[in-house]
Image (cartoon, grey):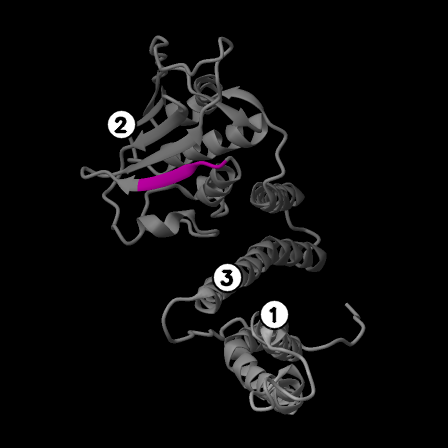
Amino acid sequence: MTRRPGLSARLKLTLSYAGFLMVAGALLLAVVWMYLLRYVPDNSQGLLGVSPNRYLLIHTFGPAAAVAMAFLLAFGLVGGWLLAGRMLAPLGRITDAARRAGSGSLSHRIRMAGRQDEFRELSDAFDTMLEQLESHVAEQRRFAANASHELRTPLAISRTLLDVAREDPTRDRGELIERLYAVNTRAIDLTEALLLLSRGERGNLTREDVDLSLVAEEVCETLLPLAEQRRITLDVTGGAARTSGSAELLERMLTNLVQNAVVHNLPADGTVTVRTEAYGDTSVLRVENTGRPLAPELVPTLTEPFQRGAERVRTDEHAGVGLGLAIVRSVVRAHGGALRLAPRPTGGLVVTVWLPGAPGRDGGYRVGTLPVCHRST
């Protein structure tokens, strides 16, 4: 943005300091005149020809007062210039850091020493902002690199299959079409997941009243065949848990949680429990599954994009694209909620989601009192 040149803050402060000193000097002279000189007799001979009068005092005190005012002006300008420079020095460091950040260098930190004051508070807040920006930019770059790699893989496989078909016309076209279809489906799923993740990160939602218990029943009903195929018992229990948000995104969040819980489970005879409940103005969703024990250091990484949890049990046909829990985290954040992942002592994972509750039709918050809904193989 182009601006017209103006006075610097240091020069403005200097002129302000000098101006205040001149005003203070003028007020002092006015006080002397009002409370001293006005009561001294005014004649050319003086009092009885001996005592000084107003005429003599003015002609004697006037030049000295003028010299004092000139000294105050000079002292105000020089002292104000030095004092303003000292006071604005921290602001210069902050400005330099802002210019570096504007040029793309987010690793620089001010780290201003000294006791707490307004400038130190500003520099600390600026350092915190730079740290968050650097972390966010690094995360976005890492995400872009991983997304590019993930999208490149199915495209490279498709190109290889087409090259093989072109070089070998006798190859079974039915097998080729099936493989191309599978690769293309995976690429579409990955693209849709990336778009959904981006939508959740933006947070521009069309909000409506959503009951998580009803959504959980619908999702579990849809995924029941997958659970039956893997001999997993799927339970839905709890009561009404109302929240305000995007029904589509919340359904995707629940789908990802339940599907992950089914896929990353024991090879057979495992369980998945989905529970919804309300506590005052908070709606709680808990998804718990059985499985092999998880390393504590692995759990925090599961919500990172393209982290598939290599130590978790799964089959190749449900390997996914590594965005399931990342989308869950994004949706939870977009709805102003909180997400917690914790390993079960006997194996498996417990995922807990807290979302702001929505008032019921009677204006109050409902506590989970609905009958238990059960789905099992």
Relative horizontal placement of residue 21, taking residue 120 as reference (left or right): right
What residue span does the magenta drawing correspond to?
A: 336-341
Q: Main secondary structure of the magenta part?
A: strand
Q: Nearer the viewer, mark 1 or mark 2?
A: 1
Answer with the quarter of the image where residue 98 lies: bottom right
Image quadrant containing the C terminus: top left
As measured in the structure, the alpha-carbon distance from the residue carrying label 3 to the one carrying label 2 is 49 Å
Magenta stretch holds residue 186? no
Find disc 2 in the rendering and name its residue: 269
Against 260, residue 15 (above or below) is below
Are the residues flagged by discs 3 and 2 in contact, CB closer than 8 Å? no
Find disc 3 in the rendering and name its residue: 129
Against 346, residue 269 (above or below) is above
Residue 324: where, in percent of width, then height?
Answer: 47, 41
Are the residues flagged by discs 1 and 3 in contact, CB closer than 8 Å? no
Find disc 1 in the rendering and name its residue: 34
